[in-house]
Image: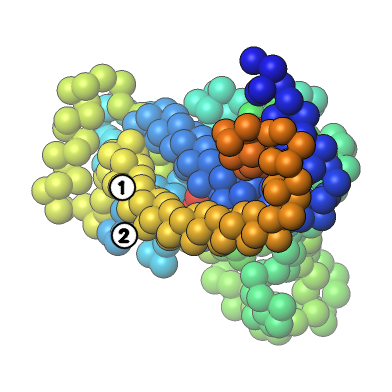
Amino acid sequence: MNAIRHALFLARRHLLHHRQRTALLVAALFIVGFLPIAVENLVQAGERALRARGDATPLVAGAPGAPIDLVLSALYFRSPPDKELRNAEIETLVEGDLARVLPLVLGDRVLGGPLVGTDPGYFEFRGLGIASGRAHAVAGECVVGAAVAAREGVEVGDRITTEPREFFDLAGAYPLRMEVVGILAEGDGPDDEAVFTGLATAWIVRGLAHGHDDLAESDDASLVMDDIEGEAIIATAKVREFVEITDENRSSFHFHASPGELPVTAAIVIPFDEKGRTILLGRADVGRLPLQLVDAAEIVDRLLVEVFRVRRILMGVLGVVGLATLLLVGVVVALSIRMRRVEIETMHLIGCGPGRVPLILATEVLLILAVAAGLAFLAGGLVVPMLSGAERLILG
């Protein structure tokens, strides 16, 4: 026991005396241990979050295409698929009171986050509470996610403006100023990074509806290019389009197509029972409707298979790098022992037994490994709490 205590004392004093060399060895071993621990913890946290959100979403409907892109758009508001559905196609799919539908209109942004057009029932479906204010009720109102509100300092009653899709979008819709009527409670998910509004508002932002001066009641002749009696009034470019929806101008907003022709990026379909689910999947599989209906949990599992494949490759690369680092550390230790030949001979001359010197040297190596491993496990365990949204890190 005394031999071990003496070895610890001498090893510790030697390592502290050569601080720079010790720090470099600890840093090299720390990186080798930290990276695989951090990757594993992130993948596991992301897997749990992905599975939880996928399991909470029964079915997702969208236009034919890549099902993974569709599900990621519906669950995480990523870039929407190239093709979209018409509102009438969703209604045809669920006719017969088989399911509840939450349409999603995506593609626009505000305050650096996605603008999500959906029904207020989405908050109840996701279990999202309103921290202050209320849910959106009419066109022009929006509810801001907790992370966006905290980052931008948004409060109930503020006005926020949507971002143009393209910088030089001369023919596109004007940015729309929306009133913030609610702030979501923190949900620790992608909903915190989004701004929610009604479907009508999302369509207005896209330019599928607009409001302007009432030409029939206007006395300004410069606003009218031609008046076809009983048919239409052709306006000039001088007509002022509204960029904010208020109680005074809300009635002037009108759509350019019938409600059934308006686009929907995706839809979350919630069957009322297992029979309804089977019927809905059958309708989609028949192919009479130009859409696809997928099980979100099944698609998430397919995505995770690819994630795990990448993890295995990455772990293999890290293993090779770790082995090379350990070999280099071994070379450094061997060279250090040769440089300490005089010191070791002196230790023998003052009475150290044959086994004491190897014990001291082994203790030095073990102390370095223990410190590096302890720091690696500690830092690896802190990665997920410090980096919120592990599933978004996995999805890039």
Q: Which residue is mark 2?
A: 66
Please, what is the three-letter code of the amino acid marked with disc 2? Ala
- Residue 324 in view of the camera: yes
Element carrying mark 1:
helix
Q: Residue at x 30, y 61 (%)?
A: 65
Which of the pair 287/388 is nearer the observer? 388
Q: Which residue is mark 1?
A: 305
Q: Residue at x 46, y 32 (%)?
A: 48
Of mark 1 and mark 2, the one earlier in the sequence is: 2
Q: Is residue 211 above or below residue 151?
A: below
Q: Residue 25 appears at what percent x and percent y?
A: 68, 52
Distance in Å between CA atoms under marks 1 and 2: 16 Å
Q: In front of the other: label 1 or label 2?
A: 1
Q: Residue at x 60, y 78 (%)?
A: 228
Which of the pair 103/385 is nearer the observer? 385
Q: Residue furthest left?
A: 286
Q: Residue 37 appears at what percent x and percent y?
A: 53, 41
Q: Residue 139 appears at what percent x and percent y?
A: 67, 44
- For the residues bearing labels 1 and 2, Cβ distance under 8 angstroms: no
Q: Is residue 168 above or below residue 267?
A: below
Q: Residue at x 57, y 61 (%)?
A: 331
Please, what is the three-letter code of the amino acid marked with disc 1? Val
